[in-house]
Image (spheres, rainbow, N blue to C red):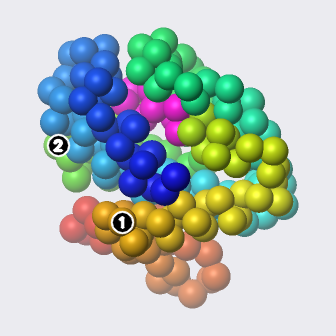
């Protein structure tokens, strides 16, 4: 599985239609939000997994959600938005509002709708990654995320989008996710 497979699972007609119907949105809007958000989500997860504590917390979350990877459509229909919002809060931390605003600006979809869409897909992302990570735990996360991001780069250009979002413009050794997103959004 690579980033393109995850994107495909979340942007297939049935998945997009389910989310669009749930929030009374156009399918093209939903697809645009997911496509624009996934590289940022994966990049932020990779950044979180770069510390021992972050990797352990992410591995636990993946393990908790792994059993739900079987039926993405069912997951999306019954998505717990509170759980999804918590997941996004853990992934993006204090940058969540800015990330949602940036995706909103890029896609033309209202920020609250972007938030609902991402909260709907967040548990499914963890389920798909948890299934892929298996019993590897925190030790396998770096390889999993690196492989997914590298795979996305080779098959669809998502890795290159992520690369732009993950630049270290201020030289502090940490990706400037928001600065990178700003460059993606024409800022």
Q: Which residues are magenta?
A: 116-126
Residue at 31% x, 38% y: name it: 11
Q: Work out whether 7 lies above or below 158.
A: above
State the SS at label 2.
loop
Q: Quadrant of residue 157?
A: bottom left
State the SS at label 1.
loop
- Percent x, y for residue 108? 17, 43
Does the magenta-highlighted stretch encompass residue 122?
yes
> Can residue 162 be seen at all in this image of the molecule?
no
Determine the main secondary structure of the stretch shown in magenta.
helix
Q: CA distance from mark 1 to mark 2?
A: 26 Å
Residue at 39% x, 54% y: name it: 4
Residue annotated with mark 2 = 108
- From this viewpoint, which residue is outermost toward the bottom? 171
Residue annotated with mark 1 = 155
The tally of labels here is 2
Q: Is residue 133 left or right of residue 102?
A: right
Q: Quadrant of residue 22?
A: top left
> Can residue 166 be seen at all in this image of the molecule?
yes
């Amino acid at each position: 599985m690579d980033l393109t497979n995850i994107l495909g699972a979340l942007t297939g007609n049935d998945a997009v239609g389910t989310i669009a119907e749930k929030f009374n949105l156009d399918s093209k809007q939903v697809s645009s939000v997911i496509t624009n958000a996934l590289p940022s989500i994966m990049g932020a997860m990779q950044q979180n997994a770069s510390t021992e504590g972050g990797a352990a917390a992410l591995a636990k979350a993946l393990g908790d959600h792994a059993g739900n990877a079987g039926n993405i459509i069912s997951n999306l229909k019954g998505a717990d938005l509170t759980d999804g919002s918590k997941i996004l809060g853990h992934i993006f931390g204090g940058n969540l509002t800015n990330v949602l605003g940036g995706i909103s600006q890029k896609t033309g979809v209202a920020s609250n709708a972007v938030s609902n869409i991402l909260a709907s897909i967040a548990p499914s992302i963890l389920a798909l990654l948890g299934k892929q990570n298996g019993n590897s735990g925190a030790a396998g996360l770096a390889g999993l995320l690196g492989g997914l991001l590298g795979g996305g780069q080779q098959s669809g250009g998502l890795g290159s989008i992520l690369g732009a979002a993950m630049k270290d413009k201020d030289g502090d050794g940490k990706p400037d996710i928001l600065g990178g997103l700003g460059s993606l959004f024409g800022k």
